[in-house]
Image (cartoon, helix red, strand yellow):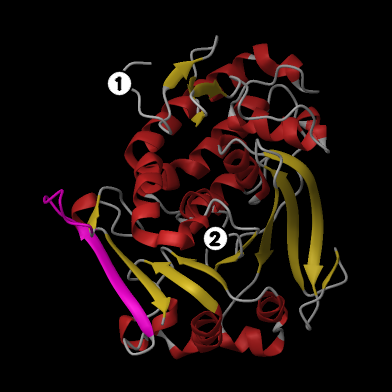
């Protein structure tokens, strides 16, 4: 391991040729390596859901209830295509975000509180990249949740097309850092893999998490979490675990956050209020909060955020009072000595030469 810094991630390949990343930790002077099956724990509380996530993500399924699909030509091709896309994403985006976050966000990069990601769609990928230790991720969008994927119910003849549609729905996020909602909804509509759940499964599995449970839920008008069908805001609750066994929760709610809808049904805002102050991410948010038609969600985030990380489509800069907020701007620069230098794309201006990230921390 000559020349390999402690804490770095060497790139190894498993027997299928897929690149794996192995964390190295220095403990008293010994190097201890995590096993190559880094993306799983010994047991998942819901082995079917966890195996389904690995299947959809194109990851090895050895020892899972879906291991028999490992030789299916449609799945083998799907796995190879996703590997290529993920290697590129890791090199151009995720590894650079992980390097940038501790230096630029300080303690917030390790914060374990709730995380708010409004107008997110199923983009758990970037939520987790910037704030990997959040205890509860709250995502929302207008995309439907869809049914829990059931691989055994997909006819063999339909499997290649279903997986191809899933990959197509991921294209814009993998290449441009944000979802194009109308394209994603078209790709997954009328497919054997519908809604945002298959996408969330892929992101969780590729981030090396184990899915412990998946439960349809809803919110009532008072923000109480209730059973599916008993509330006005549908959602899904996914409990997942890191390789070290720490449990985290992901919620996705289908919700329109325009004032006219929130006034009628404030359940999501009230649910978020109960979580306390949180970590806020706004990316490719359609510039909606520049309009007074989205003043309620904007006011909530300004009042309940421990940090706001956003592109220019989020909360208008003019509404962040410098007397109340510590504001920092980061942009692409050729000067490697500048602490504000960015090396990754973000939001609509995903090309490196145009990317800007704003970080606001309340004083």
* Placement of 250 over or under 24, stated as above or below: below
Q: Is residue 96 left or right of residue 141?
A: left
Tell me the quarter of the picture where residue 272 sits: bottom right
Q: Which residues are magenta?
A: 325-339
What label does residue 111 carry, if any? Answer: 2
Tell which residue pokes out farthest to the left in this image. 335
Mark 1 neighbour class, 10 Å CA radius: few under 14, some 14 to 19, many 20 or more: few
SS category of the residue bearing label 2: loop
Seen at 47% across and 62% down, the residue is: 108
* Placement of 355 over or under 239, stated as above or below: below
Q: Is residue 350 left or right of residue 174?
A: left
**Image quadrant containing the N terminus:** top left
In this rendered view, identify the residue nearer to me: 266 or 133: 133
Q: Label 1, label 2: how many angstroms apart (C-alpha)?
A: 31 Å
SS category of the residue bearing label 1: loop
Instruction: Please say whether residue 332 is one of the residues in the magenta stretch.
Output: yes
* Placement of 281 over or under 81, stated as above or below: below
Tell me the quarter of the picture where residue 8 sits: top left
The residue under label 1 is: 3
Q: Position of residue 88 (x, y in %)?
A: 37, 32
């Amino acid at each position: 391991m000559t020349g390999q810094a402690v804490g770095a991630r060497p790139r190894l390949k498993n027997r299928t040729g897929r690149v794996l990343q192995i964390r190295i930790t220095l403990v008293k002077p010994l190097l201890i390596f995590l096993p190559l099956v880094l993306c799983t724990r010994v047991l998942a509380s819901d082995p079917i859901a966890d195996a389904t996530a690995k299947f959809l993500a194109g990851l090895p399924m050895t020892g899972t209830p879906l291991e028999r699909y490992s030789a299916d030509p449609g799945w083998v091709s799907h796995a190879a295509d996703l590997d290529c896309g993920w290697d590129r994403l890791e090199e151009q985006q995720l590894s650079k975000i992980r390097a940038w976050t501790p230096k630029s966000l300080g303690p917030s990069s390790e914060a374990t509180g709730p995380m708010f990601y409004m107008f997110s769609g199923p983009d758990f990928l970037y939520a987790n990249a910037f704030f990997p230790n959040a205890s509860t991720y709250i995502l929302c969008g207008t995309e439907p949740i869809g049914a829990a994927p059931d691989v055994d119910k997909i006819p063999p003849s339909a499997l290649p097309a279903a997986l191809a549609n899933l990959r197509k729905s991921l294209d814009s996020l993998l290449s441009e850092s944000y979802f194009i909602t109308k394209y994603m909804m078209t790709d997954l509509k009328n497919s054997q893999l519908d809604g945002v759940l298959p996408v969330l499964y892929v992101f969780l599995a590729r981030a090396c998490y184990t899915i412990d449970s998946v439960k349809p839920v809803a919110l009532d008008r008072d923000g109480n979490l209730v059973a599916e069908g008993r509330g006005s805001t549908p959602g899904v609750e996914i409990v997942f675990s890191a390789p070290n066994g720490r449990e985290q929760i992901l919620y996705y709610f289908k919700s329109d956050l325009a004032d006219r809808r929130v006034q009628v049904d404030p359940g999501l805002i009230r649910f978020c209020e109960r979580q306390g102050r949180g970590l806020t991410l706004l990316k490719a948010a359609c510039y909606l909060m520049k309009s007074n038609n989205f003043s309620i969600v904007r006011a909530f985030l300004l009042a309940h955020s421990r940090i706001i990380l956003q592109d220019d489509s989020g909360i208008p800069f003019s509404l962040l009072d410098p007397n109340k907020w510590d504001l920092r701007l980061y942009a692409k620069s050729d000067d490697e000595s500048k602490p504000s230098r960015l090396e990754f794309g973000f939001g609509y201006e995903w090309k490196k030469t145009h990317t800007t990230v704003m970080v606001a921390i309340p004083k």
